[in-house]
Amino acid sequence: MIALLLVLVLVGGWEAYAQLSGIHEIVLPAPTQLAAALYDDRALLWSNFGVTAGEIGLGIALALALGLGSAVVLHFSPPLRSALYPLLVGSQTLPIPIVAPLLVVWFGFGLAPKLAIVALVCFFPIVVPTLDALERVDADQRKLMRTFGASRWQTFRIVEAPFALPGLFTGAKLSVAVATIAAILAEWSGSEEGLGHLFQQALPNLETARAYAAVLILAGFAVALFGLLAVAERRLLPWARPVPLARLSRGMLLR
Amino acid sequence: MLTRIRAPEAAPPVKWTGSCAVSLDGVGKTFASTRRGGLAVTALDGITLDVATGEIVALVGPSGCGKTTLLELVCGLIAPNVGSVESARAALMAQRDLLLPWASAVANAAVALRVAGVKRDEAHERAAALLRDFGLGGFERARPDELSGGMRQRVAFARTLLAGRPVLCLDEPFGALDALTRVEMQGWLAGALARDPRTVVLVTHDVEEALVLADRVFVLSPRPGRVIATLAVTTARPRRRTDPEIVALRARALEALGA
């Protein structure tokens, strides 16, 4: 409710400023002009949105598969973990704006370099919380499974894997935020379609409102994806839901 | 569905010759310090005790006298530095219930059966039947966070029983419960063991709990743990804390503990 009000105030202020200050629409389009661009260019925006959404969705899926696989492998093999963890951290320090053009040179203008970049950026935030959650399983819990004669794999399947699911969700939610940025950077490094490409084309053509529309759509998509993951987490992992802070503080106020 | 890869069955690290359910002979256990230059800790020293098949024994002693270490030795989770441990296969029940927070009561109780390769439906059926015996009918589908502390311990005990081991090692099973629930659960455990007799090694720091439940009570000294008194309880079950023998033995045990 308050959030909605805040958005209304901000948009209203923006509109008032754009209308009253006499600023040119090429410099700062008003929200109404942005809305007009959204409507007029809907076909163009929609087809380019499809491209970028595909890059983000497939990139995250690829990162999830690789990240989950790596976390499990590293969890099962401590020597491999100590050998590969520094490399993993190193992969995160690669400056994407520099790597992206190299990948375009390597893979061409198609989907492949975009997927590689999105997956590279998302891999780290997925592996770390997942591996962390796997490592943090109660030692007594493992001991109990041993007294039942459980194999390493059974302990993983029955105890460790479910314990690590909240970590995997945390990783997926983090990666949604960075995947959008990664996809845009990838498109800027060389592409013929996508919202990032559209944005890049719109500015020199003085279609500022269209560029703003592209950004708005991307932000909305990232927020929606994040929300979807949060809902899925609540549905699938009701046991992992933290006690709401509001309930705690209300109880304290009553005392 | 994941394929099941089973590790080759490891030889039980604890030997068992069959004369007694559990037999400890001159057992000592010292833990090296985890810090460099730290002192090694001797948890147990020269423990010798036998537990007959079907007998319930209790170990009482102050905190840190190596009671939990003793149970881990019996369960084969660790090996002694000196002496020998022989035991039939044992299942461990800890003070914390260690229930899986995402799994229903019935799935939690069935964990040991599932590990042993029993099919899901059959395992759940057996677990549900036992939970009903334990007064948990209607709570089969409840998750642990929806159950009270006493109910959770009953689920944990069902899981331990269903492991199907002849020896049960109970480590402070009611230590986390409030005093009233504790007394109630002690009566309940005595009843459950009367229906399904097992060899039991019970660890507790509550002398009354030990005397109400056990056939014999071993009193351990502070670290390093040694047996400083053995008390045989002959009063017929069900026992009450006010039975004359219990009261007399309680005084003796507390005296041995220096309390």
Image (tube, helix red, strand yellow):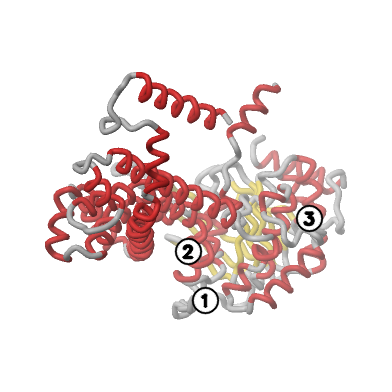
Residue receiving disc 2: B83
Q: Earlier in the sequence, mark 1 or mark 2?
A: 1
Question: As shown in the figure, which amino acid type bears the numbered disc 2?
Answer: Gly
Front position among marks 1 and 2: 1
**Residue B120 makes an appearance in the image:** yes
Relative image position of residue A53 (x, y in whole percent):
37, 57
* Structural crowding at the residue carrying mark 2, measured as other residues with C-alpha within 10 Å and reported as few (<14), some (14–19) or many (≥20): some
Front position among marks 3 and 1: 1
The residue positioned 70% from the left and 21% from the top of the image is A255
Question: As shown in the figure, which amino acid type bears the numbered disc 3?
Answer: Val
Question: As shown in the figure, which amino acid type bears the numbered disc 1?
Answer: Met
The residue positioned 64% from the left and 40% from the top of the image is B257
Residue receiving disc 1: B1
Label 2 resides on the chain identified as B
- The image's mark for residue A235 is none
In the image, is B51 to the left or to the right of A167? right
**Residue A76 makes an appearance in the image:** no
Depth order, front residue of B226/B188:
B188
Depth order, front residue of A181/B227:
A181
Residue receiving disc 3: B233
Mark 3 vs mark 2: same chain? Answer: yes
The local secondary structure at tag 1 comes to: loop
Relative image position of residue B231 (x, y in whole percent):
72, 53
The residue positioned 31% from the left and 51% from the top of the image is A195
Mark 3 vs mark 1: same chain? Answer: yes
The residue positioned 56% from the left and 28% from the top of the image is A2
In the image, is B107 to the left or to the right of A206? right
* Structural crowding at the residue carrying mark 1, measured as other residues with C-alpha within 10 Å and reported as few (<14), some (14–19) or many (≥20): few
Which quarter shows the N terminus of chain A?
Answer: top right
